[in-house]
Amino acid sequence: PGDGEPAERALRAGCQPGDWIVFVGAGDIEAEVERLTESLRAKDKRRGPWQEIAETLRLRLSEGAKVVTEEPLAKKTTLRVGGAARVYVEPASVADLQEVVREVRQRGVSLHLLGRGSNLLIPDAGVEGVVVSLRNPGWETFAVLADGRIRVGAGLRLKNLCGLAAKAGLAGFEFLEGIPGNVGGALRMNAGAMGGWMFDVVERIEVLSLTGTRLEYQREDLHVGYRHCQELQDAVALAAVLKPREVSAAEQVGRQIDVYRTKRQESQPREPSAGCIFKNPAGDSAGRLIDAAGLKGRRVGDAEVSPVHGNFIVNRGRASSADVLQLVREVRAGVKAASGIELEPEVLLYGAKWEDEL
Ligand code: EPU
């Protein structure tokens, strides 16, 4: 493209990190090459390490893995808002995941786990980090063990766990019906519904630490609480061994699932949402408090406090993450004014801190 400025403009527009540039010329071409490459490197630095991380992972991960940059995340969440992941990875095996963990650690960037995308809010600007999702079918395992317990992979959807256990005549997992998550997410959040909690049925979990070591924990060694599991704050759940409450006729388990489904359909909205947006304060229900404060139906942009259940913010179409955040602030302020209670968000805010946003 010629010397100096025009060459630099053409290179800036057409070059991706990892490309080779061949210079052909005479005279002071060497000085020009030096200047151009320095300027492009500086631009690369400003763009962050993402392209390089993705390239390294593409080389190291198995063929079945997916590694992309700038992957839009909104459609991978149940609320359907938010921007892109700088790097998005679907590892196909534990070895793949270990490579991801190692790379993230070496580069000093953050790792975010994306389950089935419920219970989280992605900022509009996206996620400055590596987002990992266990969507590869290899993570969706379900096996009945010889002793009657079941071993499930972290990527198995709760809906499928519920259905497969019912088919096998194993009771005790019906409460998981309708929670739009996978096993890994349910473990991390100690998901609960209909009076049951994920860790009520867990006997053992297998995890990968952020240093890449595989560990196993027995239920009694875990520190779990309301929507919380300490050992999974900085580790990735790989699998769990679960204990059925009893062996039962498949139809009977199915009937209990239907009861819960009907209850949920009657009391919770169907529009896209992140599930309950606030934690229940001790001894009360956030939904009831929001309702009593007259906040149902309140709107910011396309984000709306569901008229069906006060603790759900639904996306009426084109809500942004900023709309949802603003509505969260307004609902908190409204409940505080009406009842004196300060609600705490239940959903995870990716790449940002609630303290900074509220
Ligand atoms: N209520 C109202 N108005 C409302 C919503 C609820 O008056 O707008 C009243 C209900 O009538 C009921 C009480 O509040 O008397 C509790 O409501 P609900 O049974 O719907 O339960 P919740 O406490 O609001 C919890 C979980 C849900 C779970 C349901 C069903 C939390 C924050 N929420 O909701 O979990 O599905 O129980 O078991 O723990 C989630 O975590 O994302 C979630 C949706």
Image (cartoon, helix red, strand yellow):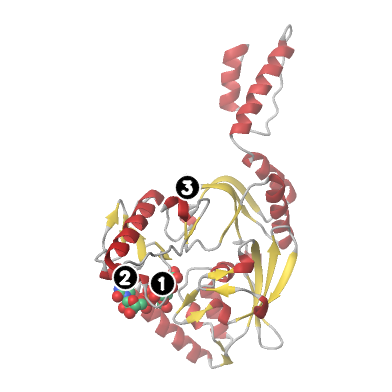
Q: Nearer the viewer, residue 4 or 186?
A: 186
Q: Quadrant of ligand 1?
A: bottom left
- Mark seen at residue 25: none
Residue 206 position in % (x across, y down): 69, 71
Badge 3 crowding class, 10 Å Cα cut-off, few under 14, some 14 to 19, many 20 or more, is many
From the viewer's perspective, is residue 198 above or below residue 319? below
Three-letter amino acid code of the residue under disc 1: Pro
Foreground mark, 1 or 3? 1
Q: Reading the chain from its start, which is encountered first: label 1 or label 2?
A: 1
- Mark seen at residue 289: 2
Where on the picture, by quarter, is residue 276? bottom left
Residue at the disc numbered 1: 281
Q: CA distance from mark 1 to mark 3?
A: 31 Å
Whether residues under marks 1 and 2 lie with C-beta atoms below 8 angstroms apart, the answer is yes
Looking at the image, the residue that sits furthest to the top is 27
Residue 24 position in % (x across, y down): 72, 15
Can residue 305 be seen in the rendering of this structure? yes
Q: Reading the chain from its start, which is encountered first: label 1 or label 3?
A: 3
Residue 320 position in % (x across, y down): 38, 50
Where on the picture, by quarter, is residue 33? top right
Three-letter amino acid code of the residue under disc 3: Gly
Q: Could you tell whether 317 is left or right of 249 in the image?
A: left
Foreground mark, 2 or 3? 2
Can residue 16 be seen in the rendering of this structure? no
Q: Could you tell whether 279 is left or right of 17 in the image?
A: left
Q: Residue at x 74, y 66 (%)?
A: 214
Residue at the disc numbered 3: 83
Q: Reading the chain from its start, which is encountered first: label 2 or label 3?
A: 3
Q: Nearer the viewer, residue 158 or 331?
A: 331
Q: Secondary structure at mark 1?
A: loop
Q: Residue at x 42, y 75 (%)?
A: 282
